[in-house]
Amino acid sequence: MENFLGLALQGTQAYKDVEREVRIRIIRKLMAKHVSLEDISEIVEMPVEEIQHVASNELG
């Protein structure tokens, strides 16, 4: 049972990691097309502040 729970937690974390990477890729593409932060916020369902944080940390 412990092994199953460990695998489930690993799967959950892997899903979160993939979801974050996909959001970052979408943010990059939308920013490259000069889409407003407010519109990006609605599309990726993240607050503008978090998008700004991602942009400054992940995108350089």
Image: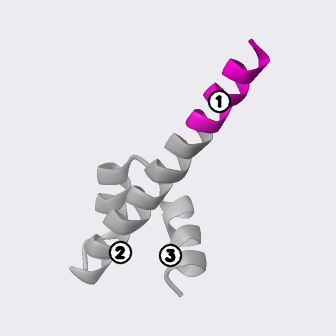
- What is the CA distance from the residue labelled 2 to the residue labelled 1? 31 Å
- Quadrant housing the C terminus: bottom right
Which region of the structure is painted magenta?
A: 1-12
Mark closer to the chain start, 2 or 1: 1
The amino acid at mark 2 is Arg
Who is closer to the viewer here, 27 or 2?
2
Whether the residues at callouts 3 and 2 have beta carbons within 8 Å, the answer is no
Residue under the image location 35 percent in, 74 percent down: 28
Residue under the image location 45 percent in, 49 percent down: 19
Residue bearing the label numbered 1:
7
Horizontal relation, residue 44 to residue 53: left or right: left
Residue 47 visible in the snapshot: no
Picture coordinates of residue 39 (x, y %)? 28, 60
Picture coordinates of residue 2 (x, y %)? 78, 18
Residue bearing the label numbered 2:
28
Q: Residue furthest bottom?
A: 60
